[in-house]
Image (tube, rainbow, N blue to C red):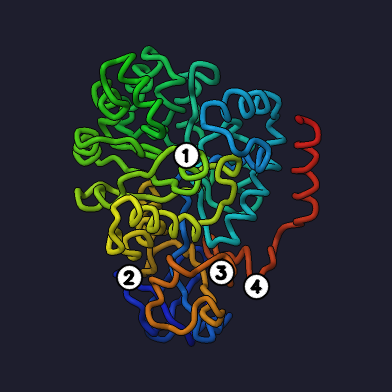
Amino acid sequence: MIKFTNGLVLDKDFNIVKTDVYVEGTKIVKVGGELKADTVYDLKGNLLMPSFKNAHTHSAMTFARSFADDLPLHEWLNTMIFPMEAKLTGEDIYNLSKLAFLEYLTSGVSACFDMYYFPEDMARASVDTGFRTVMCCAINNFKETPELLEEYYNKYNNYDELVSYKLGFHAEYTTSEELMKKIAAIAEKYKAPVFVHASETRSEVDGCIERYGLTPAQLFDKLGIWKYGGAGYHSVWVNDEDLEIYKKNGIWAVINAGSNCKLASGIAPVSKMLKEGVKLAVGTDGPSSNNALDMFREMFLIAATQKINDMDAASTPAIDILKAATVGSAHCMGLYDCDVIDEGKTADLIVIDLKRPNMQPINNILNNLVYSGSKENVKMTMVGGKILYENGEFLHEDTDDIYAKAQAVIDRIK
């Protein structure tokens, strides 16, 4: 048993309290009180809090980090990314995903919601590193089939406690109506949510209206794709009717401010979503479009762009963004058992170093996390009761080997 003591704790109600937390195996077994522990982790006045969950990413796209920058989305995808993706193998996905996992850990992320291909290799990388992964299918007109989607759904929801799988497809503009209807039928069969890129750019929405007379959200609602919930990744160009559909079906708007800024896709109406009661989660998007996998940068950008968008410095309080990046993202991903610090929850925890200049003086710790916090403040990341990253070191991985194998992929496919 591990006892976290002599520090601050962000409790289940998002209050900062002075208490002890006990972890045994993969679980938080007690908050407060006194138990005998084999290991005492002295927080030294620092903050223990639930980890961040990255609710939208494409981990293995580390292959294209800084390779195809300064291009608009559709040119970036069609002329640069898709041709390189065609050369990737399953072993490439394994090695490239492990590189992304290292970066997640430095940012206090214990789980990612990954939309990509070669799920067997992604799952293997997750189990081998001890990192938590929720996988989501990226079926479209060019890759994979509804039959594979259903096969993956059944296989990877019974694979390992670190791995789970959700129904999904890439986007309306890459997926035929016939395919979308088949995906809706699978969602109906399993009463399951569906996750998809939605309303990321103005041209995407305009194209959908041209094809169907409907926005992406309206089309998904009509086809029954979102009957049992799901998420719209990006959700930038959404109108009032779209937001009503999000609320009606319990759809998560997964906000990716870094990628949307860099690709000039636009600013999602987060402040309006909060007022309307739309559920919010946070993701980085992939490392080829962001290019970082840094949840601190995402939180700051979401908050800052809302203030600019609304021309109101009081818009979108930091606490709402912090909750979206932790609890919101966890719930969006179906990770209800590792969302907060509470007895019986899975121990996906991080320690925030408050003894760094950017966190001093202490007026409001939670605001500090969003407005001045950074990866340098992540002192420890624990996944399922196991410390994977501490004091700048990866405790169970040969980083030089991971870096070399990732570079070898790039050298080959370029």
> Can I make out residue 15 in this image?
yes
Instruction: Report, in whole angstroms, how far the alpha carbon at label 2 lies from the one at label 1.
Output: 33 Å
| Of residues 264 and 398, the one drawn nearer to the viewer in this rendering | 264
| Of residues 268 and 31, the one drawn nearer to the viewer in this rendering | 268
Horizontal side of residue 12 vs 162, given as left or right: left
Q: Residues within 10 Å of mark 1 (few under 14, many from 20)?
A: some
Instruction: Report, in whole angstroms, how far the alpha carbon at label 3 lies from the one at label 1.
Output: 30 Å
Q: Are marks 4 and 3 in contact (CB under 8 Å)?
A: no
Disc nearer the start of the sequence (3/1): 1
Circle 3: residue type = Val
Horizontal side of residue 99 vs 313, given as left or right: right
Circle 4: residue type = Asn
Disc assigned to residue 264? 1
Residue in view at x 59 percent, y 46 percent: 291
Q: Is residue 150 above or below residue 249?
A: above
Residue bearing the label numbered 2: 14
Residue 346: which quarter of the image? Answer: bottom left
Q: Are marks 4 and 1 in contact (CB under 8 Å)?
A: no
Q: Position of residue 366 (x, y in %)?
A: 39, 72
Q: Is residue 264 above or below residue 184?
A: below
Disc assigned to residue 391? 4
Q: Position of residue 202 (x, y in %)?
A: 37, 30
Residue in view at x 36 percent, y 81 percent: 17
Residue bearing the label numbered 3: 378
Q: Residues within 10 Å of mark 4 (few under 14, many from 20)?
A: some
> Can I make out residue 337 in this image?
no
Horizontal side of residue 284 vs 215, given as left or right: right
Disc nearer the start of the sequence (3/2): 2
Instruction: Report, in whole angstroms, how far the alpha carbon at label 4 lies from the one at label 3.
Output: 8 Å
| Of residues 201 and 348, the one drawn nearer to the viewer in this rendering | 201
Disc nearer the start of the sequence (4/3): 3
Disc nearer the start of the sequence (2/1): 2
